[in-house]
Structures are given as structure tokens and as C-alpha cells.
Amino acid sequence: MNAVVGVDSKVLLDLQSKLTLETAPGRLLQAFEYVVRNARQAVEHESAITVSSRDEGDEVVVRVEDKGVGIPPEVLPKIFQPYFTTKDARQGTGLGLNIVQRLVKEGGGVLHVDTRPGEGTAFTIYLPAATVVK
């Protein structure tokens, strides 16, 4: 995790989910990594990023929340567009959130973003749980 958020950042984990996901773990890990990396870039070093999971019916809900700068209303409609970025070229290509959206959709899930400029952003991913055959 240090490679994603940096050694001086805090990530708080609240993992409550007991269900298994049907999605390919490597692809899912890539999606989570991009969301956490974006959160890290939005917060000050002292601020923590919270990653939580819970079961909701037959879905696993994963939420990555930061107390960073938030996403301005004029930028929000563009964040999933390929190559859209508010960062300079050394910090990103503008593909991260586009890839996250694609990976979540391919896994049968849904991605929501809630943001308040000046207060922070939360990305919530809803993914179907694996069917258990008895």
C-alpha cells in the first residue's frame, strides 16, 4: 500500500464484508489502486484516506473516501473521460478513473462518486458477490 499512497500517508481500513467477489482479483486490485492513488493526490499529508467495505444484500460495497479538496462541479462531468486530467503530465495521464469505471462495469458493478468541493470525495463501488452453490 505504501507504493500507492506514500509512506507518510494514512489509510484507515474498515473492512466488514464477508462475501466473496466473482470479479477477477487482479483487475479489481487495479481499480482500487487507482481510486486510492487519486484520493492520495487530493489530500494533505496529515489527512487520512478511509477504505471501507460492507455487504449489502448480494453485493459488496467498497468505499474510498478522502477529506481532500473535492472535485469542482465544472470538472465532475469529465472525470471518467479518457485522457482528462487536472494534473500535470508527471502526475498522471488522465486514464485512471476511466479504467476504474471500465473495470467495475466489466465486473458487473456500478461506480458512484460523491464530492463536496473543499470537503472531500468518496468513490463507492458496488460489486456482485459470487454465487455460492451448496
Image (cartoon, grey):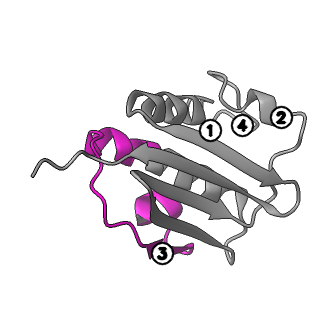
Of badges 2 and 1, the one in the foreground is: 2
Element on which disc 3 rests: strand
How many numbered marks have been drawn onto this rendered protein structure? 4
What residue does disc 2 label?
A: 75
Displayed quadrant of residue 19:
bottom left
As drawn, the label of residue 14 is: 3
- The amino acid type of the residue labelled 4 equals Asp
Q: Position of residue 18 (x, y in %)?
A: 31, 67
- Specify the amino acid type for callout 3: Asp
Give the residue displayed 62% in from the left and 38% down from the top: 90
Residue type at mark 2? Val
Q: Nearer the viewer, mark 4 or mark 2?
A: 2
* 106 lies above or below 97: above
Quarter of the image where the N terminus is located: bottom left
Q: Is residue 77 left or right of residue 8?
A: right
Q: Earlier in the sequence, mark 2 or mark 1?
A: 2
Depth check, front residue: 112 or 47:
112
**The furthest residue to the left:** 134
Q: Tag 4 or tag 3, which sits nearer the N-term? A: 3
